[in-house]
Image (tube, rainbow, N blue to C red):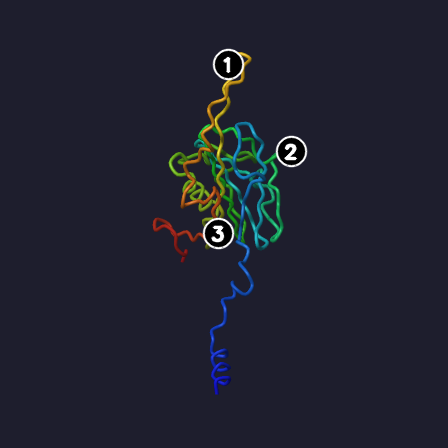
Amino acid sequence: MLTALLLLHSLAAPAAPAAARGGAADPPVKVWFSSDGKYLFGDRAKVYARTAEDGYLVVLRADAGRVRVLFPIDPDGDQHLRGGKKAELKGRGGREAFVVDDTSGHGTLLAAFSKTPFQFDQFAKNGRWDYSALDQGVQDDAEAALLDIVQRMHADAQHFDYDIATYAVAPQPRYVGWAYAPYPWAGWWDPWYGPRIALGFGFRTPYYYRPFFGPGRWR
């Protein structure tokens, strides 16, 4: 009798969630640095990205009130990326993605992924990026400003996925004559460390754009 009851209980037990059985799925898009996101002024930063599926990618960088496009290098460049493969986002001439030259103490990268191409017409001029159009309104909230730019690059589509990575910049050393006299080191300064973005990295769920109403599904 006891054996029969145990058998019935095992048959009635709910199945484990798919994520628990098969492990966590890869995020739709991920962006990261070759280092742990801690740099000195003048360092050359390598940046990598990976998408779970084939699709289209744009990567923006904000620092000290400026916005730069890391990928694609030019507005008419190839924005398509093969899914499941790590890709280094190289700068012009095959160099590193960017040189750390900001003075704000930190910077932000946003990588956006979509199944349809992004449209860059309003941010392009003479075949190059129009940075006067990209730099508007980035002073107060870098992440919100970058998302607004991506929304305008993808206004006709339903949604896109994105990932955020931040980096910290140590103060420049101070020189007096020929003597080397650095500032006292007080740890990496990054006021964004906290619950919102752990250790400078944060995966974001799919972003659905609905004008004036914040996140939601575009209908």
- For label 1, the SS is strand
Q: Which residue is mark 2?
A: 93
Q: Which residue is mark 1?
A: 176
Position in image of residue 138 (x %, y %): 41, 36
Inspect the image, locate mark 2, and give the three-letter code of the amino acid beneath it: Gly
Position in image of residue 185 (x %, y %): 47, 27
- Which of discs 2 and 1 lies nearer the camera? The answer is 1
Q: Which residue is mark 3?
A: 160
Is there CB contact under 8 Å for labels 3 and 1?
no
Inspect the image, locate mark 3, and give the three-letter code of the amino acid beneath it: Phe
- In terms of sequence position, does the residue under pointer 2 or pointer 1 come before the other? 2
- In terms of sequence position, does the residue under pointer 3 or pointer 2 come before the other? 2
Inspect the image, locate mark 1, and give the three-letter code of the amino acid beneath it: Val
- Which of discs 3 and 1 lies nearer the camera? The answer is 1
- For label 2, the SS is helix
Of residues 3 and 116, the one nearer the viewer is 3
Cα–Cα span, label 2 and label 1: 36 Å
Position in image of residue 146 (x %, y %): 45, 41
Rendered view: 49 above or below 91: below
Position in image of residue 154 (x %, y %): 48, 48
